[in-house]
Amino acid sequence: RALERSPVSEVHYIDGSGVGHHVAIAGGEAFPVRHPRSSPHSRHWRRPRCPRRHVPEGGRGRGDSPGCSETSHWRLSSSASAPPPPPRPPARTQSRARKGVPPTPSSFPLEFLSREGRNRRRRRGEGRRGRDGGGGGGGGAVGAMNAAYNRLLSNGGSGSATPSPPASPVRSPRLRHGRSGKGWRGAQQHPWGQVRTLPQRIAWALLSLLLRRQAIFLFAPLIYISGMLLYMGTVSLDVVPQIIARPPPGSVYRSPQLYERLHRDMDSDNSSDHALATIWRHPYKGGEWKACINRSSEGLADSNGYIYVEANGGLNQQRTSICNAVAVAGYLNATLVIPNFHFHSVWKDPRLSILEMSYSKIKGIHNPPSKGKKTMHSKFKDIYDEEHFMDTLKSDVRVVSKVPDFMMERFGHNMSNVYNFKIKAWSPIQLYKDAVLPKLIEERLIRISPFANRLSLDAPLDVQRLRCLANYEALRFSNPISTLAESLVSRMRKLSIDNEGRYIAVHLRFEEDMVAFSCCIFDGGEKEKKDMSDARERGWRGKFTKPGRVIRPGAIRMNGKCPLTPLEVGLMLRGMGFDNNTSIYLASGKIYQAEKTMKPLLEMFPRLQTKETLASAEELAPFKNYSSRMAAIDYTVCLQSEVFVTTQGGNFPHFLIGHRRYLYGGHAKTIKPDKRKLALLFDNPNIGWKTLKRHLVNMRAHSDAKGIEMKRPNDSVYTFPCPDCMCRHKPE
């Protein structure tokens, strides 16, 4: 009846003990209502399927199906139909509601509150004012709603006990400011969800203080200085800490101490893996390389003139000059005169007379004056087979032994009157065509001196072919040198019968001039330093004593620039797996302090041989005073060895490595140690034999893997003959 007299002003959804109810407010009184789809015998309500929003009569909300309206979905429980919902309140009423001022009952809209809506209303304080009975019409409406809720629960249809009031909704964690009964300090949570202890709370407070008051950081330097002053005030200045001075790495030659400590483990090591027979295991996957130098089949055109060159330097530097001269003469279509050897004083070839040698020894000078004394010297035919050289090149380059007389008459039979070209080092071949060829056609005879390294490493294929032809085919040692060298090779193979004729050739550079030039310090003490300083002054006057030049022997050693001593060569080879039954041929000059330095190497390899021990004095007599001829003998014996070991850079190992690649299918069969790594290993006073051997075996395997290498730009064709001088044959 009250509902018939007064229109429904609002409907509330109350959730109590998990059961939902709807209450209508009409005329200041509350009435329970039910949904038409609910059970007719229960006043508990379900959520309607249609959206619970106010829809004007005859209208339809977004998402509602046809016929779904507030008047059709909601009705009072005491009557069959409910009055239509009131019209939408004006904008002024809505603004009052947003400000928290309750509207009048006659204009209060029909509203279905969700959980979020109830929380929003509680935060505005409407619910609290309703429970306290104050706040005007809005508070009375909420109080009537609570009374209706209590009446609804007391008249429940199922006869169950009165449920408890609805629980408060879960509030946002940011609004939880209440304290528990046990005290809020014990229940305060860590920002990461853990209970903070007292040290954590103190740290957190300090961190918060620092972040909020960043100006404190301005006092940090002052605090640091104050702390340092306080600490220094507690230190007694009467006691000065002792500073132990340690030498820089590499400045001390430790190899003798290392050998003394490891030689017992070395001798008792029986784990040799027959390294000499199984050392080369790395085949080239692309196939084997074979020599393929094409020779010209066409006739030679008329010559543009004669080229006379002077080859300077040692044996292999002379070899470079000869091969480059062949390439230039062939490129310019000129006739090459057999090169003249212009010897450098360092090589002492041509050798001085006995009187001059004695004078040099007495006076202690390097280049004694030779007034009228006739000297002995080597010519081209003394080292190389001249006839074989000319016959091999006859279809590609014209070669004559000397300049014709009719040509020398133009210059008064004096070679100094011939125009001499001063070519810069590593000049391109195009320079010879642009600058040398016109002068050659005009003069018909030119001279190039000096000629070592006067042609760039990279050149057209035709020029590279002539280089390969001259180096690997045309240049062959003279018959006396070849005969003695082959005899020494045969003797080495007989001494290596236990290893099926295999032997190792080692190129050792530990002569006095090499030790002096390196500026490294060994175990000779002050006498050694004085002797090396005098040797540097004799050979390179003022080069090492220039103002501002600083010599650091330790840095030189650690950079791998020091020559390996005989002791270090022995340690390296034993560590690589070669036992004391291995035959070794030592190619070297006069070893510095040989009696002292060679002793440990002979202890590790008793079968070590040199050309002086293999050949008799009578056999070596024709070559004894000629360093280039003696070097040619070493070159041949090293070329035929199973393993070649290089210990220092230079032209000798570079030419030999390339020649071995040319003979052995592209593989150098050469051990080229990493001298920087060796310096680190030998400088370690605590290294053990097993550790040292493991590193050295890996170094040997690396040399095997690097045996076959292709020529890259700026590489020498005399060291890397593939692919300019060799062709690859794929296995079938």
Image (cartoon, rainbow, N blue to C red):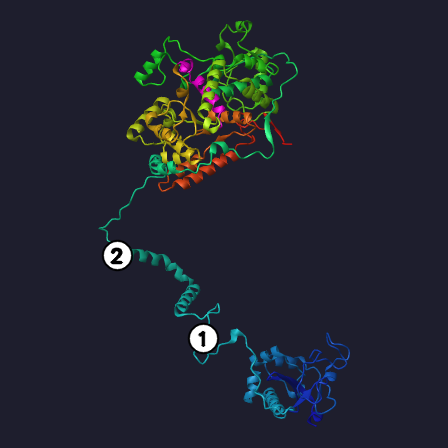
Q: Is residue 33 above or below residue 361?
A: below
Is residue 269 rendered to the left or right of residue 340?
A: left
Q: Is residue 629 magenta?
A: yes
Label 1 residue SS: helix
Q: Give me the residue at 56% from left, 21% from top.
A: 467
Q: Give me the residue at 46% from left, 37% from top.
A: 697
Q: Looking at the image, is mark 2 or mark 1 nearer the viewer?
A: 1
Q: Which residues are magenta?
A: 618-644
The spot of residue 441 in percent (x, y) is 59, 13
Residue 152 figure quarter: bottom right
The spot of residue 585 in percent (x, y) is 43, 25
Residue 684 figure quarter: top left
The spot of residue 155 in percent (x, y) is 63, 93
**Tag 2 residue:** 234
**Residue type pointed to by label 2:** Thr
Task: Please identify the dominant SS of the magenta region.
Answer: helix
Q: Is residue 596 above or below residue 68?
A: above
Most extreme residue toward the front, as rendered? 498
**Residue type pointed to by label 1:** Ala
Q: Give me the residue at 74% from left, 89% from top.
A: 81
Q: Give me the residue at 32% from left, 17% from top.
A: 361
The quadrant in which the C terminus is found is top right
**Tag 1 residue:** 187
Is residue 9 at least partly visible in the picture?
A: yes
Label 2 residue SS: helix
Instruction: Estimate how packed mark 2 is, as few (under 14), some (14 to 19) or many (20 or more) residues with alpha carbons within 10 Å.
Output: few
Is residue 419 rendered to the left or right of residue 104?
A: left
